[in-house]
Amino acid sequence: MTPLILVFCLGIVNFAAHKALLESNHPMLMHVPWFFQALGGRLSLIVEFVMLVGVMIVAASGSTGWALLYALYTALNGVSAWLVFSGRV
């Protein structure tokens, strides 16, 4: 049960960072592939949701490895968001 709760909380962090980046209108967003720009960037949020649901299903079945990989993914997203918002990228 703990990995499932961890993945859910990390999913909230990922969605918050992703949404903030989409709303920032950073010039870098103009260079992402067209399919991530579809629906005003919402398609990328759908991909994020599908990943979260998949990891939650696997974590609920007892796999802590996927939860740890999702934690690493969240950390990388956090670093990326920090780089964008701090003006380093």
Image: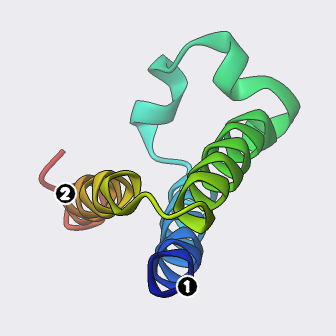
Quadrant (top left/top right/bottom left/bottom right) for the C terminus: top left
Q: Along the horizontal axis of the image, is 9 left or right of 27?
A: right
Residue 1 numbered mark, or none = 1
From this view, report whether residue 69 is shown above or below residue 78.
above
Q: Secondary structure at mark 1?
A: loop
Which residue is found at the position 38% from the left and 56% from the top? 70
Q: Along the horizontal axis of the image, is 49 left or right of 22?
A: right
From this view, report whether residue 13 is shown above or below residue 22.
below
Q: Nearer the viewer, residue 39 or 50?
A: 50
From this view, report whether residue 75 is shown above or below residue 39.
below
Which residue is found at the position 12% from the left and 53% from the top? 88
Q: Nearer the viewer, mark 2 or mark 1?
A: 1
Which residue is found at the position 57% from the left and 52% from the top? 58
How many numbered badges does the structure rendering display? Answer: 2
Say what amino acid the circle numbered 2 marks. Answer: Leu
Question: Mark 2 or 1 closer to N-term?
Answer: 1
Of all residues, the one furthest to the front in this rendering is: 62
Q: Which residue in the protein does label 2 denote?
A: 83
Q: Secondary structure at mark 2?
A: helix
From this view, report whether residue 55 is shown above or below residue 82.
above
Say what amino acid the circle numbered 1 marks. Answer: Met
Q: Along the horizontal axis of the image, is 27 left or right of 15?
A: left
Which residue is found at the position 69% from the left and 37% from the top? 47
The Cα atoms of the two marked residues, 2 and 1, are separated by: 33 Å
Of all residues, the one furthest to the right in this rendering is: 39
Residue 9's spot in the image, x, y percent?
A: 52, 83
The quadrant where residue 39 appears: top right
Q: How is the image coloured?
A: rainbow
Residue 63's spot in the image, x, y percent?
A: 43, 57
Quadrant (top left/top right/bottom left/bottom right) for the N terminus: bottom right
The quadrant where residue 50 appears: top right
Residue 30's spot in the image, x, y percent?
A: 53, 25
